[in-house]
Amino acid sequence: MGRPRLWRVVILVAALIYFFGPLVASIKYSLIQANGSYSLGNYAQILSNGALRSSMFTSLEIAGIAAVAVVALMLPTVVLVRLRLPQLTLLVEGVTILPIVVPPIVIAAGLAHLQGSAPEWLVRLWFNHPLPALTPVYVVLAMPFTYRALDTGVRAIDLRTLVDASRSLGASWFTTLTRVILPNVETAVLGAMFLTIALCLGEVVIATIMLYVTLPVQMIQVGAASPGISVAISILSFLFVFVLLFLLSFLAGRRRGSSSVRVI
Amino acid sequence: MIRFEAVRRQYGSVAALAGLDLEIHEGELVALLGPSGCGKTTALRILGGFDRPTSGRVLVDGRDVTDVPPNKRDMGMVFQAYSLFPNMDARSNVAFGLRMRGRDKASRLKRADELLELVGLSEVADRYAHQLSGGQQQRVAIARALAIEPKVLLLDEPLSALDARVRAQLRAEIRSLQQRLGITTLFVTHDQSEALSMADRVGVMQAGRLEQLDTPENVYRRPATAFTAEFVGAMNRLPGRLGDGGQVQVLGQRLSAINANGHQPGAAVEALLRPEAIGLFPDSAGAGEVTQRTFLGSAVRFEVTLDGGQRVLVESSSHDTELAVGARVGVRILAESVAIAAPGEAAPPEAVAALA
């Protein structure tokens, strides 16, 4: 068994280098100082840099609200289409894929036009802060991914029977959605939320054109002046997403884990 | 008491229910039996509130519930597909309906445990659906449906996904539970032995209509319509010729026809015979050959192909088991009188009645 084992080691090492090489290099780059010594100076600067901090909070707020909004909007839609309006499946699939077909620059141009022509009270309400302005846009942008992720999850369960069972036991539609459907498509929901968060933390085109300073926009600006800080930010956002992913899948796994003594 | 009044359900141009009138008495188990597409499941779903009739109405205890949503109907339902919530253990599944009714945690868990005990599954209360066998899952589903103390229990082919042994056992358990609790039950099945063995009354359905609603004995022995006569139990149609004085010549035997009136002497007719009304005996010069043999336990069912190509179903008790496929056999009609019908036409039910 010497040869296969050797191959496994080779592949594993190659994969580790591929994935962790750039990461280690980035971490090293973010720590190194002009005089060649290592310190956490770049990271300390992120915390002391007020503009960076506020853009980070803005982006996290947008990501969090968009992730919840996407599920709140798309899960009932998927269930409704599956149960009551199967004839609309193709139409809904077509509509949800539109945000990919329409380039972000076009969406931004449309928004800019709206901003210019809308009544002043609406502009003040909607466009004065990146949170109300960008969150709905990102929810729409995330639709192609979230709809498919949720649809796949819902297809995997016997939706009609579970819904009928829940309804016959006295549950309202809302309770059926939150207590019966949601827990059983948990993985798909988490997947949809991650995709949305990743999208919100990476989108620059629309934010830049609309002149909002979100985290990725700020990173580009800071990166032009001091690349070390910019890399430190990307390491932090990577760590943030990683920890979030780990925490959520751990929580989900623990609940299922208690029931997964499968050998009986 | 449950009442369907002229309930129609139209899907496009197809009428799944073509004016169903049905009454189910308090504490009674009524089985709806019929081929797939006959409307039996539609009737059940309409009673459960999962579907709405195009016209007509449904009454429960005199109250019109046609437009009441399923979560306000107080009906427990057991489904054909496994329907336990995968994210909850057996106990939480059973307690779910009580939770929806705002019962406090201690009392609903206590009640759930009582019901799991009732269906003999106390020891698996902490298990999840994927850790239970099919039979156990359906038992938990029954406990869950009963936990809410429903006015009506709806059973949508709950046994059809189970293997034969478990099915027979659960059949008896469901019936005894239903009788013990005195709960009004509508049971939908395409399996006639299930319907005949469990129900107080059997409703035979075809093409969205109720053909007959009667006790299992009467449905089998005194079918009210031609469809019931031929759908419930197997029926042979053997060619014969009507002679004088109500005599009919079938397979070389002279038998008296129960319903010779309406047929001309000398006319070609078909004799209607249940498989158990025909016997087989080994005979190397016999008129037929055994082409299929199915061992049923207490009896054996043979399919015999006569030399003319006519197939005959014969069911006989186990002592004939030595007849194997390919054996030449003689066929003998054991009944002394038969019902007849014009070739290809439906059997008159009152005639079939005398056969069983």
Image (cartoon, rainbow, N blue to C red):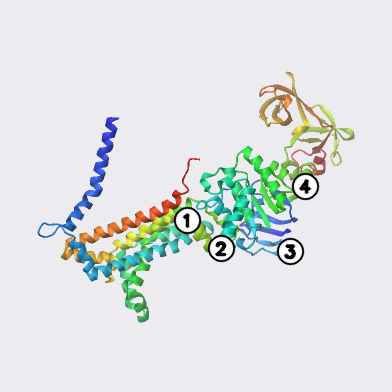
Q: Residue beneath label 2, please? A: A172
Horizontal relation, residue A19 to residue B71: left or right: left
Q: Are marks 4 and 2 on the same chain?
A: no
Q: Residue at x 85, y 42 (%)?
A: B262
Q: CA distance from mark 2 to mark 3?
A: 25 Å
Q: Earlier in the sequence, mark 1 or mark 2?
A: 2
Label 4 belongs to which residue?
B215
Residue B64 % position (x, y): 70, 65
Instruction: Kindly indicate whether the residue at mark 1 contacts the one at mark 4 (C-beta within 8 angstroms).
Output: no
Q: Residue at x 36, y 64 (%)?
A: A64
Chain of the residue on which disc 1 is drawn: A
Question: Residue tagged by mark 3?
Answer: B62
The Cα atoms of the two marked residues, 1 and 2, are separated by: 16 Å
Q: Is residue A151 above or below residue A4?
A: below
Label 4: few (<14), some or many (≥20) within 10 Å?
A: some
Q: Residues within 10 Å of mark 1 (few under 14, many from 20)?
A: some
Give the residue type that dot 3 points to: Gly
* Gap between marks 3 and 4 measured at Cα: 24 Å
Report the residue that reaches farthest toward the left.
A35
The residue mark sitting in front, 1 or 3, is 1
Numbered disc in front, either 4 or 2? 2
Please tell me whether mark 2 sits on a helix, a strand or a loop.
loop
Q: Position of residue A235 (x, y in %)?
A: 24, 58
B161, A239: nearer the viewer: A239
Q: Are circles 3 and 4 on residues that touch, CB within 8 Å?
A: no
Q: Position of residue A242 (x, y in %)?
A: 31, 55
